[in-house]
């Protein structure tokens, strides 16, 4: 039975700092079992937070980077007498003595740019890019793709699948329209995407279903082949040229003249051959990674290393591969789904549910720390999307995460107060955008006590650095990959990561920029 009076007394005792251990356990139990109790608790937290803010302002104390939204003022404070009494009481007691919950400033949210993607890069084999490059799995925005060699497979959002053979220049205009200035392409167009059009100069090649190819050399030389179904030619088409081509037909258009020829499927890339080439390239990268992984296991200062290979399914145990690591530092997999990693044969774990995590324990403390992970971010739905949390509630606790706006953050607890100022923090600029969702990234963060600074890295490149004001030793202890240990005072207990991870390393020293660049 819900005992409101008892709850009010326990909450008041909590904010007055006189809660006993037994009463704390009782309060925690009431909060966990009742949404009504949690709502009442949060109302009290707002009440006390307002008192504290006003007391601090009265004393000349300034919040760091505080960007609080306007708060609902309890009607109590509309009465000046009550307000004065509350402030006087708070100042008299001293705001710093209150065992209050942490009240970090609101995370500044950055609005994601509109998703201008028109296709997904689903395969890239032996590719050399000219200009801007893209990674397999990355969303492709409108704009030019230029390659000097290799083969790409593009999955347009309209459902069209295009194979582009280099050297080639293809401009993506919409999910149904592209311009080919150089190279070869084949397009397979499902019925819902009929009307997919490729431009070359003033020629428009409009698919009427189902498969065709184009070979282009500038704007004066274009060959169109129909492998299945029908293609319609529009725009500047030489006279006496058939406007509609059917299966087995082709036309060569050169310098304003056209020549009918037979369609030749063999002059374009074979889909089966592309898959085989992609498989060989994937295997080669996997073997190179294995060699690098063997070296990494023996690296100086490496305390925990999970390569996500050979997961023991019956026990869901992930071995710690660091040289000399004991079995009690192995990871326990909770909820995560075994999936593929950067390559077909590379193992990874998928994090999706609020419970998903890899839990492990290391011991001791360290003045410096380096964290490294290969991750595939699928979305950033939460204000805090945890990559790792360690030693919860202790001085030296570490949180490593991405926020909703795509920034990478690290926090090191420097004292035992539940306050924002208790943390040494470093935030990066936005490093993950919606176009990065689904592609693999190498993330690393360094806490460097010797040089009193912290640094963030993305794909081997430093993206942020900042001072380490208090050189608090990093506490090594219970750690969670992809999640946090929820604490009862935490009003945002859901902080799980959404994506995949296929390699993680923890060093008890500060790696140099050169060492991190060599790891990707």
Image: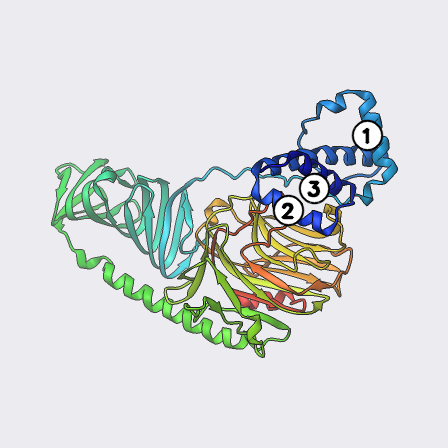
Sooner in the amino-acid sequence: mark 2 or mark 1: 2
Q: Nearer the viewer, mark 3 or mark 2?
A: 2
Asked whether residue 470 appears in the rendered view, the answer is yes
Q: Nearer the viewer, residue 394 or 451?
A: 394
Quarter of the image where the N terminus is located? top right
Q: Is residue 157 left or right of residue 71?
A: left
In the image, residue 307 sits, relative to residue 177, either above or below, namely: below
- Judged from this view, the residue extending furthest toward the front is 1
Q: Position of residue 192 (x, y in %)?
A: 24, 38
The structure residue drawn at horizontal position 50% and vertical position 72%, both measured from the top left corner, is 319
Instruction: Tell me which label, 1 or 3, sits earlier in the chain.
Output: 1
Residue 360 lies in what quarter of the image? bottom right
Q: Residues within 10 Å of mark 2 (few under 14, many from 20)?
A: some
In the foreground, 88 or 513:
88
For label 1, the residue is: 86
Q: Residue at x 38, y 55 (%)?
A: 147
Of badges 1 and 3, nearer the viewer stands: 1
Camera-nearest label, 2 or 1: 2
Residue 55 appears in which quarter of the rendering? Answer: top right
- Looking at the rendered structure, the secondary structure element under dot 3 is loop
Pointer 3 local density, CA inside 10 Å: few below 14, some 14–19, many at least 20: some
According to the image, label 2 marks what residue?
A: 28
Asked whether, in this view, residue 107 is left or right of residue 226, the answer is right
Number of marks: 3
* Marks 3 and 2, the one that precedes in the sequence: 2
Tag 3 residue: 103
Q: Secondary structure at mark 1?
A: helix
Q: Label 2's element?
A: helix
Mark 1 surroundings: few (<14), some (14-19) or many (≥20) residues within 10 A: many
* Percent of width and height locating residue 5: 68, 34
Among the 4 quarters of the image, the one containing residue 513: bottom right
């Amino acid at each position: 039975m819900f005992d409101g009076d008892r709850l009010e007394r326990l909450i008041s005792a909590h904010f007055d700092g006189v809660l006993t251990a037994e009463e704390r356990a009782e309060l925690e139990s009431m909060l966990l079992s009742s949404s009504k109790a949690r709502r009442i608790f949060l109302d009290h937290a707002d009440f006390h937070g307002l008192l504290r803010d006003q007391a601090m302002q009265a004393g000349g104390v300034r919040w760091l980077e505080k960007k609080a939204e306007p708060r609902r003022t309890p009607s109590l404070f509309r009465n000046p007498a009550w307000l004065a009494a509350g402030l006087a009481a708070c100042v008299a007691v001293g705001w710093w003595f209150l065992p209050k919950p942490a009240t970090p400033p609101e995370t500044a949210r950055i609005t994601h740019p509109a998703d201008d993607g028109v296709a997904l890069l689903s395969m890239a084999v032996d590719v050399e890019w000219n200009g801007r490059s893209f990674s397999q799995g990355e969303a492709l925005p409108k704009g030019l793709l230029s390659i000097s060699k290799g083969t790409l497979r593009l999955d347009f959002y309209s459902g069209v699948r295009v194979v582009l053979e280099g050297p080639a220049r293809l401009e993506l205009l919409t999910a149904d329209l592209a311009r080919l200035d150089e190279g070869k392409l084949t397009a397979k167009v499902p019925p819902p995407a009929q009307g997919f059009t490729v431009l070359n100069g003033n020629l428009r090649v409009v698919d009427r279903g189902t498969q065709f190819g184009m070979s282009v050399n500038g704007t004066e030389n274009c060959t169109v082949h129909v492998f299945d179904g029908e293609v319609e030619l529009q725009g500047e088409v030489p006279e006496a040229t058939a406007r509609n081509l059917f299966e087995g037909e082709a036309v060569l258009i050169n310098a304003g003249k056209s020549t009918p020829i037979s369609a030749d499927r063999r002059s374009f890339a074979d889909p089966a051959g592309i898959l085989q080439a992609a498989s060989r390239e994937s295997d080669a990268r996997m073997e190179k990674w294995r060699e690098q992984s063997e070296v990494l296991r023996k690296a100086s200062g490496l305390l925990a290393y999970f390569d996500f290979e050979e997961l023991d399914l019956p026990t869901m145990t992930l071995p710690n591969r660091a040289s000399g690591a004991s079995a009690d530092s192995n990871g326990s997999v909770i909820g995560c789904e075994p999936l593929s990693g950067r390559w077909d044969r590379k193992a990874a774990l998928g994090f999706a549910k609020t419970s998903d995590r890899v839990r492990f324990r290391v011991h001791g403390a360290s003045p410096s720390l380096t964290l490294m992970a290969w991750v595939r971010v699928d979305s950033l739905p939460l204000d805090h999307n945890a990559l790792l949390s360690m030693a919860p509630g202790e001085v030296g606790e570490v949180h490593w995460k991405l926020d909703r706006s795509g920034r990478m953050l690290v926090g090191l607890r420097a004292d035992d107060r539940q306050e924002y100022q208790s943390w040494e923090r470093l935030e990066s600029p936005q490093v993950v955008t919606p176009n990065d969702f689904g592609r693999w990234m190498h993330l690393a963060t360094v806490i460097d006590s010797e040089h009193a600074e912290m640094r963030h890295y993305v794909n081997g490149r430093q993206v942020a650095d900042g001072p380490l004001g208090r050189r608090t030793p990093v506490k090594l202890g219970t750690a969670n990959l992809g999640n946090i240990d929820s604490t009862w005072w935490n009003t945002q207990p859901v902080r799980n990561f959404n994506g995949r991870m296929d390699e993680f390393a923890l060093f008890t020293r500060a790696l140099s920029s050169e060492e991190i660049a060599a790891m990707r």
